Image: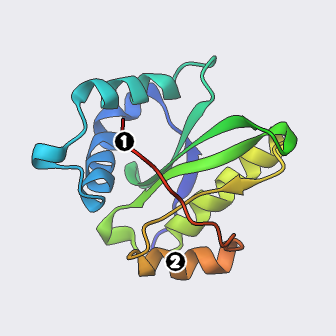
Amino acid sequence: MEAFNVRAIRRSDRAAWQPLWDGYNAFYGRSGETALAEEITETTWNRFLDASEPVHALVAEREGTLIGLVHYLFHRSTTALAPVCYLQDLFTADAARGQGVGRALIEAVYEQAGAAGSPRVYWQTHETNLTAQALYNRVADRSGFIVYGKRL
């Protein structure tokens, strides 16, 4: 298999990023009647390109084709002086699964967070996402916390 590289997203990646974003959202049941509003997608995209925003995106690319994405953001915490890093979205194209793309994207976020002085990177996944958990258990410590939420 050919090598791939991980890099910061570029404005010119918009059309190639969209199918990955759509795949990620479909995986989590956000499609059809439950799809994200276009305004959310457009705002999210624009945040990646705005240097004043704490939201960032990296992509994995092979031979000019995007094969994975990761979105992360920095936020303040009551338990640390420096902002912590939340890895919010991670997705690999079906054809690129099992080839180290997800691991490379996570490690790239670790590098970005370390360079920003962040003391921690964390994320969550659905309890049924066992394939991803197999990777996550190799690259991070499971915190044991249970996530609660309420839609308003």
Residue drawn at (53%, 82%) of the image: 134
Please state which amino acid type lies under the numbered disc 1: Arg
The reply to whether callout 1 and callout 2 are in contact (CB within 8 Å) is no
Question: Could you say where residue 122 lies in the image, as x and y percent from the top left?
Answer: 66, 57
Is the C terminus in the top left, top right, bottom left or bottom right quadrant?
top left
Please state which amino acid type lies under the numbered disc 2: Gln
Mark 1 neighbour class, 10 Å CA radius: few under 14, some 14 to 19, many 20 or more:
few
Q: Secondary structure at mark 1?
A: loop
Q: Residue furthest right?
A: 81
Q: From the image, tell me which residue sits under label 2.
A: 133
Is 136 or 64 nearer to us in this picture? Answer: 136
Determine whether, in the image, residue 54 is placed left or right of residue 67: right
Q: Is residue 24 above or below residue 94?
A: above
Q: Nearer the viewer, mark 1 or mark 2?
A: 1
Q: Residue furthest left?
A: 33
| Residue 152 seen anywhere in this rendered image of the structure | yes
